[in-house]
Image: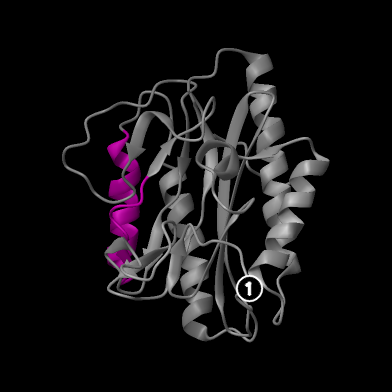
Amino acid sequence: MTIAGEEELERLKEIGRIVANTLAAMGAAIEPGMTTAELDDIGRRLLELEGAQSAPELCYGFPGATCISVNEEIAHGIPGERIIAAGDLVNIDVSAQKNGLFADTGASFAVPPVTKAFDRLCRDGRRAMWTGIRQVGADKPLSGIGNAIGEFARRNRYTLIRNLASHGVGRSLHEEPGEIATWPDKSERRIINEGLVFTVEPFLSMGGELAEDGGLGGDEWTLFSSPRAPTVQYEHTIVATRNGALVVTMPG
């Protein structure tokens, strides 16, 4: 999506604020002993109070209002009876639609007591995301995002999941310009146009290279890292401007 005017931008900012506030509230509510379904219920209620619809449910028939992935799960985890425990690594992805526009955000949370390795991984996951966001601006190369994140990961001895990409968003959950690599991609030649709306969401890992399904016995949604390794994801929806990235998924 490319922003068509101020009214459309304000609607995007509204749904961005809604998903950001929902994510922040869910993160603050995590505690050992609760189920991922109970955590999802919090997100559902907050979205409904704001008149927003869960995007995964609306667009794909996903069995939950939000995606909640724990430990070995890295994306698209189905909320259910899994009990969150102390020391777990919990990823929450919140996307929703209101007044015809979509926004998408996500974050990983380490449940106290936190190991030094998980604390560092979460800190660096946020840093990786912001490293990519700083490369955004009108007339800049899309490849700058993946190149910068890739250099950050290499320098800090992490890997990146290379088949879960950023994407266009706005009038639908996944749209033009399609997938945007958050790792170095020599084939990427596109230029960011002013007003382009998309996500920046690297998956930073302590050894994982790809996302894969659970194989026999797995569900049709949940993804795992291959090889198995602790992995975090942080995500914002942004608008490209002449002055850089305008982040619309900030709580407020």
Q: Is residue 16 magenta?
A: no
Amino acid bearing label 1: Glu
How far across and down, in percent of the image, does residue 33 sit?
71, 82
Which of the 4 image quarters holds residue 223? bottom left
Q: Residue furthest front?
A: 217
Residue at image coords 31%, 26%: 191
Q: Is residue 143 visible?
A: yes
Q: Is residue 151 magenta?
A: yes
Instruction: Give the residues drawn in magenta, as a range.
Output: 142-165
How far across and down, in percent of the image, does residue 196 sit?
46, 25
Residue designated by label 1: 81
How far across and down, in percent of the image, does residue 102 sit?
59, 32
User: What SS does tag 1 mark?
Assistant: loop
Q: Residue furthest top?
A: 5
Residue at image coords 41%, 54%: 202
Query: How many discs appear?
Result: 1
**Which of 108/75 is in front?**
75
Give the left or right position of residue 224, taking residue 93 as reference. Answer: left
Give the left or right position of residue 76, taking residue 34 as reference. Answer: left
Vertical side of 238 occupied by 181: above or below: below
Residue at image coords 61%, 54%: 64
Vertical side of 198 occupied by 219: above or below: below
Q: Residue furthest left?
A: 186
Q: Is residue 245 visible?
A: no
Vertical side of 59 occupied by 90: above or below: below
**Which of 177/116 is in front?**
177
How crowded is the residue under tag 1: few (<14 C-alpha within 10 Å), some, or many (20+)? few
- Quarter of the figure with the C terminus: top right
**Which of 229/237 is in front?**
229
**Which of 239/24 is in front?**
24
Q: How is the image coloured?
A: one colour
How far across and down, in percent of the image, does residue 215 sit?
31, 67
